[in-house]
Image (cartoon, rainbow, N blue to C red):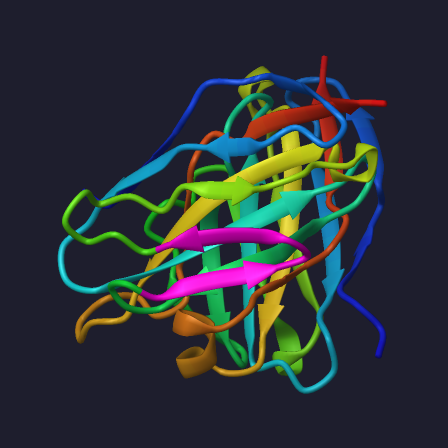
Amino acid sequence: GDSVTQMEGPVTLSEEAFLTINCTYTATGYPSLFWYVQYPGEGLQLLLKATKADDKGSNKGFEATYRKETTSFHLEKGSVQVSDSAVYFCALTKADRGSTLGRLYFGRGTQLTVWP
Amino acid sequence: EAGVAQSPRYKIIEKRQSVAFWCNPISGHATLYWYQQILGQGPKLLIQFQNNGVVDDSQLPKDRFSAERLKGVDSTLKIQPAKLEDSAVYLCASSLHPTSGSMGEQYFGPGTRLTVT
């Protein structure tokens, strides 16, 4: 079935370090891919998305490219800040006919802690 | 614009008791979702409504869980009787309409943290 696999956490970085959080997916058809972020005490927020192969989603300095050949959607940021400390979730949904529109399949989440 | 509201934020009950959660989606959002997030895991869809009709409840444990969305707006999720393994955060989300939901954004509430002892 459809699923998302994220790298194990937690990830601990110093401020201004480079961040990569790996995400791979398994899905039939043509999924859309998302990264959601959950700050402490808050609900999930959409960080970025990509709806077709080779699309690059970007927001707040974060980027992820939809790679169909490697079924991946890795999250990257060139210089992290303390305020980026949160849990990051990779997710997919299906857009092809016959799927349940809007259902999100989430990875387990990766806890990121950034130290000053 | 007000976000998705949920209550209560926290609930502690004993096993075999019942509990109910409430969700008020963003005004005008036709699609409403309930997710269960067990500690250390990603959210898992329990049920999806389109207006006041159920689109997908295939992952809802129907022997103990029930949900309704009267008048296509607010929704309640109930557990009766609760088990220890129901301890989780219950998230409500809404989206504007099903097409946007598949490729656009679901807006999440802060969740209700349930502890079953």
User: In the rendered view, does A76 fall on the left or right side of A93?
Assistant: right
Whether residue A3 is situated above or below residue B69 in the rendered picture: above
How many marks can you see?
0
Whether residue A5 is situated above or below residue B115 in the rendered picture: below
Q: Residue at (66%, 28%) from the top-left corner?
A: A17
Q: Position of residue B7 (x, y in %)?
A: 83, 51
Look at the image and give the residue range highlighted in magenta. Answer: A55-65
User: In the rendered view, does A16 fall on the left or right side of B43?
Assistant: right
Give the farthest residue toward the bottom: B28
> Which of A2/A5 is in front?
A5
Q: Residue at (45%, 48%) from the top-left corner?
A: B45
- The answer to whether residue B44 of the structure is visible from this angle is no
- The answer to whether residue B91 of the structure is visible from this angle is yes
> Which of A9/B61 is in front?
A9
> Which of B91/A60 is in front?
A60
Q: Residue at (79%, 45%) from the top-left corner?
A: A42
> Which of A82/B17 is in front?
A82
Quadrant housing residue B90 = top right
- Residue B96 sits inside the magenta stretch: no
Quadrant housing residue B94 = bottom right
- Residue A61 sits inside the magenta stretch: yes
Q: Where is residue B4 in the image (x, y as percent from the top left)?
A: 75, 64
Which image quarter is the C terminus of chain B in?
top right
Q: Residue at (25%, 52%) from the top-left corner?
A: A67
Q: Where is residue A72 in the image (x, y as percent from the top left)?
A: 29, 43
Which image quarter is the N terminus of chain B in?
bottom right
User: In the rendered view, does B62 fall on the left or right side of B9?
Assistant: left
Give the farthest residue toward the top: B117
Q: Where is residue A34 in the image (x, y as percent from the top left)?
A: 46, 55
Whether residue B69 is situated above or below residue B64 in the rendered picture: below
